[in-house]
Image: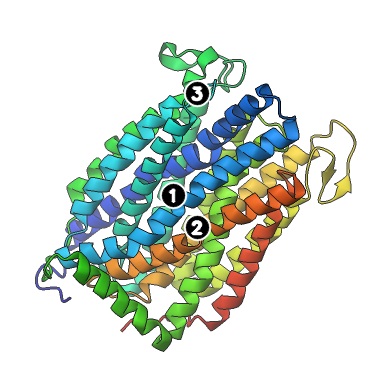
Amino acid sequence: MAVTTDAVADGGTLRRRVRGWMMFDWASQPFYTLLLTFIFGPYFAAVVADSLIADGLDPGSAKAGAQRLWSGAQTVIGVAIAISAPVMGALADRAASKMTWIVGFSVAYVVGTAGIWLMVPDASQTMLALGAFALAMIGAEMTTLFTNAMLPGLAPRDKIGRISGTGYAMGYAGGVLSLAVMLALFADNADGRTFLGGSPALGLDGAEREGTRAVGPFSALWYVVFMVPFFAWVREPRVAAKPMSLRGAVGDVMDLLRQLPGRPSLTAFLAGSMLYRDALVALYSFGGVYATLVLGWETTQIGVFGIVGAVTAAIASYVGGRLDGRFGPKPVIVGAVCILTAVLLVICFTSREMVVGIPIPEGSSLPDVTLYVMGALIGGAGGVVQAASRTMMVRHADPDGGGEAFGLYALAGKATAFLAPALIYVGTTVTDSARLGYLPVALLFVAGLVLLRWVDPEGDRR
């Protein structure tokens, strides 16, 4: 697919286009920071666990049951995204328009996030709330697919790493700000109080956890407001379109898949990133749940944990983007994955009774301090590995299309999206421990590192 016109924009237009593109990361980050990790996820787990305890389960089994439900839901959603993402990307390439798809999935995202409000403290609307979360996650992942597919055509190759890193830095900065607002004004603990000790803003009822449930409508409004620059400034180059056909799109994907045996670097990167990104998502989505179930943290404590992680992620992503531009994405990815593997092992052997397997006195704050430090490392290394992986994919993608390739990248990210939650499910079931249930995820990081050995640092884009 060749660019026919507007291949090169003037400097001012190009800068606005890049800045507008970066605003997507800022607008969408609250889903991952607030819903998936630090506010809704832990709240959901706590509500479900309390409901199971009220039904007669012992606390340990109830917490494990809550974790199984949360991981099982993400498994199903991940499989649905994995199956559809490559074909959606190919359809967008055929239509020569990714913006139309971004608008459609943005609507799904906004409706889904707003529906998080339904998760009432008595757990009576759990399935409805999970359905809303599923819609929000599909919207978030699909809009990410199409905005990522725009990256190859944004700038020359030597600038892509910096743009990707800065975009992630902006996203995490948005996550920090949105989390700070939620903690200060809305997110309430079991006593109905926010981090500042007051009642939730806007007259919300703390007894009904309305402050915490407001994370959904808040995230929806945040997205609507901050996507305005994206839609105002980002314009796609005009390209020659192909006939819109589902059969043709599937054929395009199959053609790309048939190329993989002759493209060992791309194949190794897709397989390796599939595993280490899956493990990273597990750290993100279950970190707050771990803090709730293992260390007994309240929502406000988890929020502070999130701010620490997001601040380090913003700084590290910005610095990582510059390292990426200088040394290339591959060494940056390897270093970050090594850090994440070590962090996971530390977390799995830390509880109220021990830190890294070493017993500690009762009432010690050392487990809390340790988890804060680990949260900072997860945020920093996680931000770097995501930004650098996006750059590495650009080195394997067609600059004039991108949707197909990034659809395949999304497939790689979601094809085993069930694997980390499933490993946690099995680990938790076998050990009946919310802490040790995370241990099998370390295998995904290690396997991803092994596969990176066959990735060409320069990629294989032709």
The kind of secondary structure element at disc 1 is helix
Compared with 93, 33 (above or below) is: above
- Whether tag 2 and tag 1 are in contact, CB under 8 A, the answer is yes
The image shows residue 372 at horizontal and vertical percentages of: 67, 42
Residue picked out by circle 1: 77
User: How packed is label 3: few (under 14 Cα within 10 Å), some, or many (20 or more)?
Assistant: some
Name the foreground residue: 186 vs 256.
256
Residue 367 occupies quadrant: top right
User: How packed is label 1: few (under 14 Cα within 10 Å), some, or many (20 or more)?
Assistant: some
The kind of secondary structure element at disc 2 is loop
Residue name at image x 59 percent, y 63 percent = 336
Q: Amino acid at mark 1?
A: Ile
Residue picked out by circle 2: 417
Name the side, left or right, on which 86 lies relative to 368: left
Name the foreground residue: 187 vs 177.
187
The image shows residue 355 at horizontal and vertical percentages of: 81, 46
